[in-house]
Image: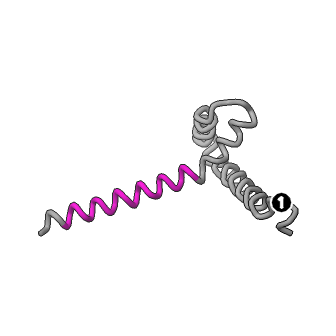
Amino acid sequence: MGYTFYIRKMNFIYQTITGIRDWFELQAFGVCEWWGNKLGMRTANIRLFFIYVSFIAIGSPVVIYLIMAFILNLRNMVRKKRSSIWDL
């Protein structure tokens, strides 16, 4: 009985962590993807840039990253809301 409970608990924890990671990858990396498309660079290079600069500048680029993500999210919401003139 104890072993199956342990397996269920570990499975629940793994699914929770995987879900959080998947959500974060879908939501948070939109900023790097947007910059990559605008600058014609690979998204992985931009992510590495943010990571390195965050270590050098002691986390201040994380705040800038979150502000850019918020602005891009608002921008996407406005665009999705009114897709045509007849939606007014």
Q: Left or right? Give the position of 9 relative to 4.
A: right
Quadrant for the N terminus, please.
bottom left
Q: Is residue 12 above or below residue 64?
A: below
Binning the other alpha carbons within 10 Å of mark 1 as few (below 14), some (14 to 19) or many (20 upward) gives few
Q: Is residue 4 above or below residue 63?
A: below
Q: Give the amino acid type for the residue marked by disc 1 in the picture.
A: Ser
- Magenta stretch, overall SS: helix
Range of magenta residues: 5-26
Question: x and y percent of residue 59 in the render?
Answer: 61, 48
Residue that badge 1 annotates = 84
What secondary structure is found at the residue carrying circle 1?
Answer: loop
Quadrant for the C terminus, please.
bottom right
Total marks drawn?
Answer: 1
Residue placed furthest toward the front: 86
Magenta stretch encompasses residue 19: yes
**Residue at x 34% of width, y 61% of height:** 13
**Residue at x 64% of width, y 47% of height:** 30
Q: Nearer the viewer, residue 12 or 57?
A: 12
Residue placed furthest toward the left: 1
**Residue at x 29% of width, y 59% of height:** 11
Image quadrant where residue 49 sits: top right
**Residue at x 68% of width, y 53% of height:** 69
Magenta stretch encompasses residue 37: no
